[in-house]
Image (cartoon, rainbow, N blue to C red):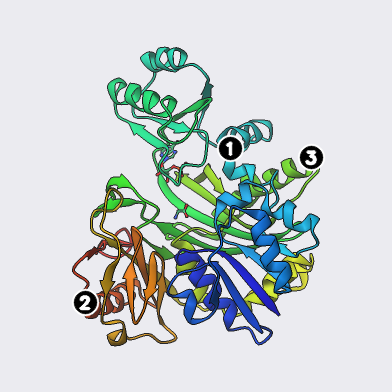
Amino acid sequence: MKIAILGSGGREHSLTYTISKSKKIKKIYCLPGNAGTADVAKNIKININNFEEVYKFLKKEEVDLVIIGPEQPLVNGIVDFLEERQIKVFGPNKIASQLEGSKIFTKTLCKKFNIPTADFGVFEKIEDAKNFLKNVNYPIVIKADNLAAGKGVYISKNIKEANIAVEEIFNGKFGKAKNLLIEEFLDGEEMSYFIISDGKTIKNFGTAQDHKRVGEGDTGKNTGGMGAYSPSRLINDELETKILNKIIKPTLKGLDELGTNYKGFLYAGLMIVNGEPYLIEYNVRMGDPECQTILPKLNSDFLEIVEACVEQKLERTKIVWKEKKSLCVVLCSKGYPDNYEKNIKINNFDKLILNENNYLFHAGTEREENHIVAIGGRVLNFISLSDDLTNARQNIHNNLNKLNWDKGFYRRDIAFKVINK
Ligand code: AMP
Ligand code: GLY
């Protein structure tokens, strides 16, 4: 089969690498890909938000199946666009993608189906939001309604901080804002829960905890994700049953009532408070770096799973996982998530120890003649599988020491809640 994968991050390199192991693969294209995907696929420089261009390419190359990595094209309706043109595609349609594209869509659905989530209010006027903030308990959470790459969320400790958040959102810091959300602060521990769905059947696709803050001890600014481990330390059968019955199934029922269904990966960002799951947000794709963390644990043929979803045969498809735990550390450019230098050479790739338990997935990298340069904030993902997370993290640190990239930094404490107790 000829496959195309859209996106250019660590998530997409892990998707590309994992699917390349399938016997049925004839050719893989990555649009636009990175220096890592170029090792297993052909990179094609195309703007993936230009659907006509994407379609022209897929048609010309007679691509059999397309996998969409990031949220933006999904929210913009790429799945509907391609399906209307008879291209098979793995990912949710435009209506279902509002689960990530509009926080208000999701909150309204939560209210209708009694899905546990933080209490919230929607505000269209700056004065109304500010008046409301005079009489609330702090900390409080303030969110832009649109896609903001994980950055449109403020946790404000007092009214002064809250007013600044409201002003920044309405002044368009995260794009044009018609309204914002003010939410109760949930005090618990976060967990990412993943399912894969064909529109009829859902199956578990792993759990993880990621570390979104830039600094050790989960401090400092929010980022796309500095590292993760899987499975989450919080998951057990009782909690999983609650997540499915109280959150996932009612959500799918809500989509059904809207006359649609869910196909693709669904990522529930949860806060677990005293053993009870609350929905913080949905993402309509795999997480990054959770995808890189989870996929190396897969024992089944990934292409068969994706095909089964597109053909609505997931019920009969077995998904088998390795028993091992997995940990991922993200190597970033110094300065991220603010300003950082670009086009910085990285050496020593040949010194890394990579094997069936140790993986390297590229994110913001590009090949330049005979070497690789960093072009993004999050640059490389190091993953290790082991029975023991301490050992996994040590393997990664050994590789990071060998790479010895002095323009980069990483968090040394990924999984600290389970490792250095
Ligand atoms: P989001 O982009 O909605 O995932 O929010 C980014 C981060 O803000 C989450 O990963 C949480 O750490 C935090 N957060 C969001 N909403 C809440 C809430 N209601 N209570 C506590 N923390 C929250
Ligand atoms: N790791 C967080 C995300 O992918 O949104």
Q: Residue at x 26, y 63 (%)?
A: 410
Q: Classify 138 as above or below 8.
A: above
Nearer mark to the viewer, of 2 and 3: 2
Q: Quadrant of the C terminus?
A: bottom left
User: How crowded is the residue under tag 3: few (<14 C-alpha within 10 Å), some, or many (20+)?
Assistant: few
Q: Residue 191, percent across and down?
A: 46, 53
Q: Amino acid at mark 3?
A: Glu
Residue 275 visible from this viewpoint: no
Q: Residue 222, percent across and down?
A: 34, 46
Q: Amino acid at mark 2?
A: Asn
User: Ligand 2 within 8 A of label 2's CB?
Assistant: no
Callout 1: helix, strand or loop?
Answer: loop
Q: Which residue is mark 2?
A: 401
Q: Residue at x 42, y 36 (%)?
A: 186
User: How crowded is the residue under tag 1: few (<14 C-alpha within 10 Å), some, or many (20+)?
Assistant: some
Dots 1, 3 in contact, CB < 8 A: no
Callout 3: helix, strand or loop?
Answer: helix
Q: Which residue is mark 3?
A: 257
Residue 88 visible from this viewpoint: yes
Nearer mark to the viewer, of 1 and 3: 1
Query: How far apart are the two marked residues, 2 and 3, measured between alpha carbons?
Result: 53 Å
Query: How far apart are the two marked residues, 1 and 2, measured between alpha carbons?
Result: 41 Å
Q: Which residue is mark 1?
A: 102
Q: Is residue 340 left or right of residue 42?
A: left
Quarter of the figure with residue 332: bottom left
Q: Classify 89 as above or below 180.
A: below
Tell which circle, 1 or 2, labels the residue nearer the N-terminal end.
1
